[in-house]
Image (cartoon, rainbow, N blue to C red):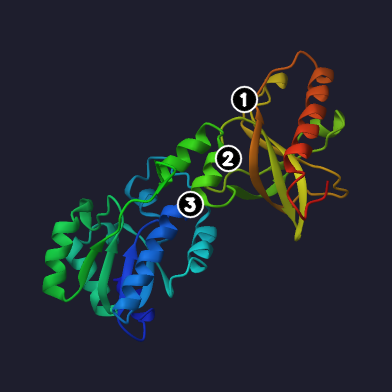
């Protein structure tokens, strides 16, 4: 089995205390979990390890659904690698892995990753049809020689921090709440693709972004954002929507970089969403749209002015 070959390749030098999950968004709740993991590992003189999957299990278990994620897979893995755990194990997920029972899966972890402890987050379960709940895992731990600890849910100002809560905030355009729960600005990274250049015609050139990256997008509207290109940071305004003024039916993401001089086509941008400015609107003319964009830019400059290191 390919996953066993991968586990053999990843074999650590000593015993491990592990946690397993998708970790979509690598938010403050996940960081709380990893902090607990490190404490348990230190107490038992073990290495702390995070196990995640690529591709994410949902995309294999429910191929008929469109699975959109808070972060791209490589960004999620990079964030996990800087989260404080001693090791991050990225395992391939496939239909064969999905068919493994909870016992078969933890046997592989015990054998090849020297698992001596397992930390389970809220609503945790693993194995075929999520059969591996806490009770079963504790019984398997007694049999295979590892102990199971349950992590407490993480609340911030009375709200449970979870990937679902972040997705809900983003879907309504509340990027400020998403930032609060994530501990960082939500961002997308995408290539600039060709467009009809309407923005340039009305005096506000925009970069049209490829949105086929598997990331979810905030709700339709206009946002104050930061744009990163070739290591430089620019204040920007980003519009997500269907361009109702032009009666188009394809959702687009367009970013206007303030004071940027140069061509962006085919380059890659990272866009950080700071605050929502307004809802998507339909305008009676291109002139009234241009006036509104001027107001959007002024408001974005004000909102972003206290952020250091940007071009304003």
Question: In 3D space, how far apart are the residues under numbered discs 1 and 2 (Cα atoms)?
Answer: 28 Å
Provide the residue designation for mark 3: 25
Question: Could you say where residue 91 lies in the image, as x and y percent from the top left?
Answer: 38, 67
Task: Please tell me how crowded label 3 is: few (under 14), some (14-19), or many (20+) other residues with Cα within 10 Å.
Answer: many
Judge depth for marks 1 and 3 and give the one in front: 3
Question: In 3D space, how far apart are the residues under numbered discs 2 and 3 (Cα atoms)?
Answer: 15 Å
Mark 1 falls on what kind of element?
Answer: loop
Residue 4 figure quarter? bottom left
Residue displayed at 82% across by 50% down: 311
Please tell me which residue lies in front, 187 or 295: 295
Residue 123 numbered tag: none
Question: Could you say where residue 65 lies in the image, as x and y percent from the top left?
Answer: 39, 40
Residue 108 figure quarter? bottom left
Residue furthest out toward the front? 157
> Is residue 36 toward the left or the right of residue 126 in the image?
right
Comes first in the chain, label 1 or label 2: 2
CB atoms of marks 1 and 3 within 8 Å = no
Question: In 3D space, how far apart are the residues under numbered discs 1 and 3 (Cα atoms)?
Answer: 29 Å
CB atoms of marks 2 and 3 within 8 Å = no
Residue displayed at 55% across by 35% down: 174
In the rendered view, tell whether residue 99 sits above or below residue 70.
Answer: below
Comes first in the chain, label 2 or label 3: 3
Provide the residue designation for mark 2: 176
Mark 2 falls on what kind of element?
Answer: helix
Provide the residue designation for mark 1: 249
Residue 275 figure quarter? top right
Residue displayed at 81% across by 18% down: 288
CB atoms of marks 1 and 2 within 8 Å = no
Q: Is residue 297 visible?
A: yes
Task: Name the quarter where the N terminus is drawn.
Answer: bottom left
In the rendered view, tell whether residue 283 sits above or below residue 66.
Answer: above
In the rendered view, tell whether residue 280 sits above or below residue 223.
Answer: above
């Amino acid at each position: 089995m390919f996953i066993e070959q991968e586990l053999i390749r990843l074999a650590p030098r000593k015993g491990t205390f592990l946690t397993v999950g998708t970790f979509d968004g690598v938010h403050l709740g996940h960081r709380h979990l990893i902090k607990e993991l490190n404490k348990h590992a230190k107490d038992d003189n073990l290495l702390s390890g995070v196990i995640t999957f690529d591709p994410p299990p949902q995309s294999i278990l429910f191929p008929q659904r469109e699975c959109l994620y808070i972060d791209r897979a490589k960004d999620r893995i990079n964030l996990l690698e800087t989260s404080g755990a001693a090791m991050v194990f990225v395992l391939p997920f496939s239909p064969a892995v999905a068919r493994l029972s909870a016992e078969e899966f933890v046997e592989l972890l015990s054998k090849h990753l020297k698992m001596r402890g397992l930390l389970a987050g809220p609503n945790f379960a693993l194995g075929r049809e999520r059969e591996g709940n806490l009770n079963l895992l504790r019984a398997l731990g007694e049999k295979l020689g590892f102990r199971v600890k349950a992590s407490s849910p993480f609340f911030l100002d009375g709200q449970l921090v979870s990937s679902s809560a972040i997705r809900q905030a983003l879907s309504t355009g509340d990027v400020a709440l998403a930032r609060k729960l994530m501990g960082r600005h939500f961002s997308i990274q995408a290539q600039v693709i060709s467009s009809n250049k309407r923005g340039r015609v009305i005096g506000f050139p925009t970069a049209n972004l490829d949105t086929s990256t598997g990331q979810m997008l905030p709700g339709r509207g206009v946002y104050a954002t930061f744009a990163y290109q070739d290591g430089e940071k620019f204040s920007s305004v980003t519009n997500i929507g269907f361009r109702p003024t032009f009666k188009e039916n394809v959702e687009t993401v367009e970013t206007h970089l303030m004071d940027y001089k140069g061509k962006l086509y085919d380059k890659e941008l990272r866009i950080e969403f700071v605050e929502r400015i307004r809802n998507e609107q339909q305008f009676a003319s291109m002139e009234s749209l241009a006036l509104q964009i001027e107001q959007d830019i002024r408001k974005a400059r004000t909102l972003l002015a206290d952020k250091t290191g940007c071009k304003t």
